[in-house]
Image (tube, grey):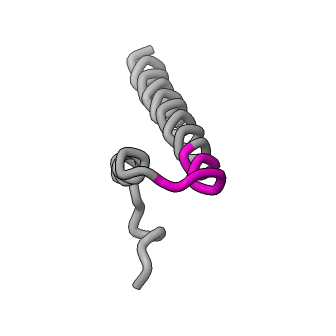
Amino acid sequence: MIITIIIGQETNKIKLNNMKLNKIYKELRKIDEFHSNFNPTNESKARMRELIALIPISKYDRVR
């Protein structure tokens, strides 16, 4: 039972992180669309950098 609770909590954390990442990617897509249709503003560029910084990068994603 204790193992089930711990696994359940980890699963909930993963789902929560995925939900957060989905929101980040959706907002990045909106900003990208805005940049393709209009001139990028300093605020939109800053927000894009802020969102990109929130995305975790694994060692496999890094360019060597």
**Magenta span: helix, strand or loop, mainly?**
helix
Magenta stretch bounds: 31-40
Which of 12 and 8 lies nearest the eye of the viewer? 12
Please state the horizontal and vertical placement of residue 4, each as a whole percent of the image. 48, 20
The residue at 36%/51% (across/down) is: 42
Q: 41 or 58, which is in the foreground? A: 41
State whether residue 50 is above or below residue 9.
below
Assess whether residue 7 is covered by the magenta stretch.
no
Q: Quadrant of residue 30?
A: top right
> Farthest bottom residue?
64
Give the left or right position of residue 21, taking residue 46 as reference.
right
Q: Nearer the viewer, residue 43 or 20?
A: 43
Percent coordinates x, y for residue 40 in the rendering: 48, 54
Tell how many labels: 0
Residue in view at x 59 percent, y 51 percent: 38
Q: Is residue 36 left or right of residue 48?
A: right
Give whichever of 52, 36 is nearer the camera. 36
Q: Is residue 45 above or below residue 3?
A: below
Q: Is residue 1 left or right of residue 43?
A: right
Position of 19 with respect to 57 (left or right) is right
- x and y percentages locating residue 59 in the rendered image: 39, 68
Residue most extreme to the front: 39
Image quadrant containing the N terminus = top left
Query: Residue 43, image x and y in percent?
Result: 36, 45
Q: Give residue 6's quadrant in the image.
A: top left
Q: Quadrant of the C terminus?
A: bottom left
Write the residue at 43% across / 79% down: 63
Q: Is residue 59 above or below residue 12?
A: below
- Residue 37 magenta-highlighted: yes
